Image: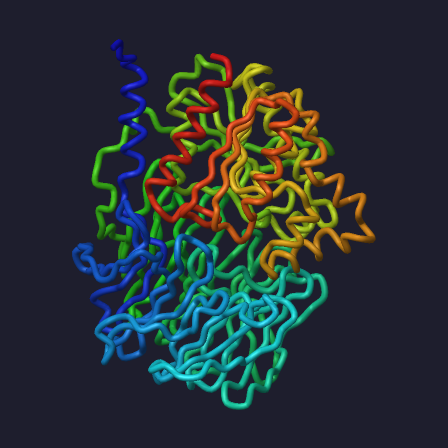
Amino acid sequence: MRVNRATSKSVQGTASLFKATEVQDLSIHPDGRTATGSVNRGGNWELARLDLRDGSIRKYLRGDQSMLSPRYSPSGDALAFQADFEGDEDHDVFIIGGRAKEPIKLTDGVADNAHPEFSHDGQTIAFVSNRDSDMENLFTVGAGGGPIRKLTAEDLPVRDFAWSPDGRRIAYGVGIGDDDHISVVDVRTNKVKKLLSKKNVEFGIGNDYGANAMEWSGDGSRLYFTSNELDPYNIGELDVVTRKTRWIVRSRNEKYAPQPSPNGDALAYLEVVDPDILLKVKTGSKTRTVSPVDGVSRIPRWLPDSSGLVFANGSTVRPEEIFVVRSARPRKITRLQKELLPMNRLAYPELIKYRSFDGRRISAMVFRPKNDGRRAGIVIPHGGPEMQSVNMWDQIVQVLVMKGFAVIMPNYRGSIGYGRKFLHLHDMDLGGGDLLDTVEAGRYLVKKGLADENKVGFWGASYGGYLCMLALTKAPEVWAAGVSIVGFFDYETELENERGFLKAYDLKKMGDPVKNRDLYRDRSPIDFLENLDAPLLMIASARDVRCPPTESRAVVERLKKMGKEHEYHEYPDEGHWPRKRKNLKDMYERSARFLDARIPR
């Protein structure tokens, strides 16, 4: 058998991209010496102990379920976490430690129960659940088990929350945009008081970078929050008695995740410096950057004695590592990437701006292959849609770059990171202007000589998978091939079958499906499949509750009848995004093989 040496080398290099241990979340032990994280060492997500002095990691708890969101009790003798089966997002809350030597399930297997947080006396755990009317609200359960109590009755999803220091109140954020508000609920009486609510204003982006969008001051008199009232997200401080607010961190960049130090002397937060996310600390009138100045920093956690912070940082050419910073420079304490990466073949992003169909400037990252003789390119828009492509580790980019593709990742209108006005450009226009922005990203590659006209492909997942199908059917002349992963393709059936918080979002952004039926149909790519010219790979997951596999299966049936060139693969043991490393690796390499074979050299 003849061996293609170039291909063999490429496969070896690609395999090394999937060898890092990943850390999704961290909870610092009250002793400040260790942390427990949700980690993936190449199988599924498990719980592991991290030594904050030498960075060593040792196994703590694993099983057939994905274990996420670990949280220590105030004493540190117990740990709460959530777990689901094969990514179906029907989590249950568990506790281990103290008298419980094995995990004890505190919830009852009904619906999705997530983000457990201990009260400050360690006796109660609050969590978010859609167990009532498929809409996320706040619930509590005793740390030792017992009845589950519903605390709130919101019509829109509760996104994140924070216990007050005295354990009597919980502040929480509600909404999907425009109708956002911040409220406080009395845990004993269930009495709710709305604290912040303004028309056409968002409050908080929670959990995207691993930290809450709001936190209490140490004495419980104030609440730190984020808001885009002044266009970019700034950090404000709210007096919970007088309800007066003041801006304490304000600039043209978006800021997220305000984290006051335990002693109240400093405030840590994340700031977007496109395409990077930096960790900064404000002490008095002085502010300093405490993270590396490139890449994405996330999951910031103060050490219990306020002496410093623990956080994760990585970039498009560096898998994430855990850092500790005190008074000096940040110190990398882990070595999560065990194998050497083919650095001479990886690409670092160039931040560019291109003009879209209406003259608006769109920010994007461009990755140039080391050998650009192929003159082919791939457009990769983010999902969400209210997300942002940033300088963080994502193997799909480097897998494609190593095959000679130039890659562009556009932050189309509706993305976060560029202010409120830009964020709302897609209102009542999902699949409209944002689609045209991504089409223009493909044309940009051609204009700049990075790709020939017949050598541009599209790769997208989730909302990006939806945009992929729209692009291939509404601008078929642009594309040589496409890969659509866990997307949705018929707005009406998606609305019928998706989770409640997504339904609320779509109704807000697209309006009533009866009154606006023409808009729903125009933005449903399943009705335009006759225009498809490019070969298409579709990938779905059997346990996906966000973009159910029925969306992909319906398209595949039509493509078969039409005789359109396509391939389809479905993961039977995954939800919306692969939890198991083998499936993630397969998905990325399957995508790259398809595009490599279908796009001319």
Q: Write down the quadrant of residue 107 in the picture.
A: bottom left
Q: Residue at x 54, y 59 (%)?
A: 205
326 lies left or right of 120: left
344 or 161: nearer the eye?
Answer: 161
Give above or below for 128 relative to 194: above
Q: Residue furthest top?
A: 2
Q: x, y (%) of residue 264?
A: 39, 75
207 or 100: nearer the eye?
Answer: 100
195 or 490: nearer the eye?
Answer: 490
301 or 6: nearer the eye?
Answer: 6
Q: x, y (%) of residue 420?
A: 65, 53
Q: Residue at x 64, y 55 (%)?
A: 231
Q: Residue at x 41, y 71 (%)?
A: 116
Q: x, y (%) of residue 247?
A: 57, 67
Give above or below for 324 relative to 76: above
Give above or below for 164 relative to 1: below
Q: Residue furthest right?
A: 515
- Residue 208 seen in this snapshot: yes
Give above or below for 578 relative to 479: below
190 lies left or right of 395: right
Q: Residue furthest bottom?
A: 189
Q: Residue at x 26, y 12 (%)?
A: 3
Q: x, y (%) of residue 139?
A: 50, 77
Colour approach in the figure = rainbow
Quarter the N terminus occupies: top left
Q: How many marks?
A: 0
173 lies left or right of 541: right
- Residue 214 seen in this snapshot: no
